[in-house]
Amino acid sequence: METRERGLTLIELMMVVGILAIIASIAIPNLLLARLNSNQQYAVQTLQALASAQEKDSNGKERSEPVTVQQLREDGQIGAVEVNEAVPNRFARRGYHFWLHTKENGWVCYAWPISFGNSGRQAYVIDQSGVVLVSNNEDTRYNGDEKIPKIDAAFFDDDGGLSVDDEKPRRDGSPWMLLNQK
């Protein structure tokens, strides 16, 4: 009597591969979107942590003047970051570039995607007021090292500050709005 080995036929194997392809086509875009949203949330949290670190040192003592990324790193307030040697107050974390600009009367920090559409879409800015503004970044497309926001990109021409009163275009031509208003 002849025994037949059990296994998958070619048609059954093709059906399994087809089902896996359908599942992957549904799951992969959702996973990529979840990673993009996670990077954007992390960017906002990093900006808020920078704002807190600018206010008080690691001992809880209020700061009298803005400090650099290097000082914050040495103080242990922003963790281990790779500081850009060419631009000392610039660093990258979880899909976003961060650039802290310090000046006599305050500071401003921008965050924009390392790879627009892949690591994030929106751009963010915060200053000493602690208010986070967001740009949909569709018009300006701040992206990695290709397009970097200038120190006053989110400022109005008339007042030179980060006013949050409306959505009119800023110096970079884009509307920046309060983070929780979008």
Image (cartoon, helix red, strand yellow):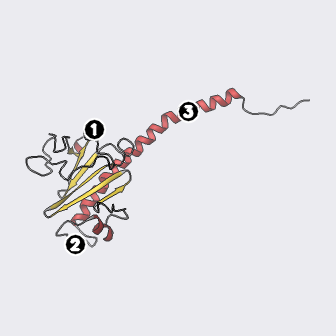
| Mark 3 / mark 2, whichever is N-terminal | 3
Q: Amino acid at mark 1?
A: Glu
| Mark 1 / mark 3, whichever is N-terminal | 3
Mark-to-mark CA distance, 1 and 3: 32 Å
The residue wearing badge 2 is 61
Q: How dense is the environment of label 1, judged by Cα within 10 Å: few (below 14), some, or many (20 and up)? A: few
Image point (31%, 56%), residue name: 46
**Residue extending furthest toward the left:** 158
Image point (70%, 28%), residue name: 10
Q: Quadrant of residue 65?
A: bottom left
The residue wearing badge 3 is 21
In the rendering, which numbered label is found on residue 138? 1
Q: Nearer the viewer, residue 182 or 99?
A: 99
Image point (33%, 58%), residue name: 91
Nearer the observer: mark 1 or 3; the answer is 1
Q: Is residue 25 left or right of residue 39?
A: right
Q: Quadrant of residue 138?
A: top left
Q: How dense is the environment of label 2, judged by Cα within 10 Å: few (below 14), some, or many (20 and up)? A: few
Mark-to-mark CA distance, 1 and 2: 40 Å
Give the vertical position of 103 relative to 181 (above or below): below
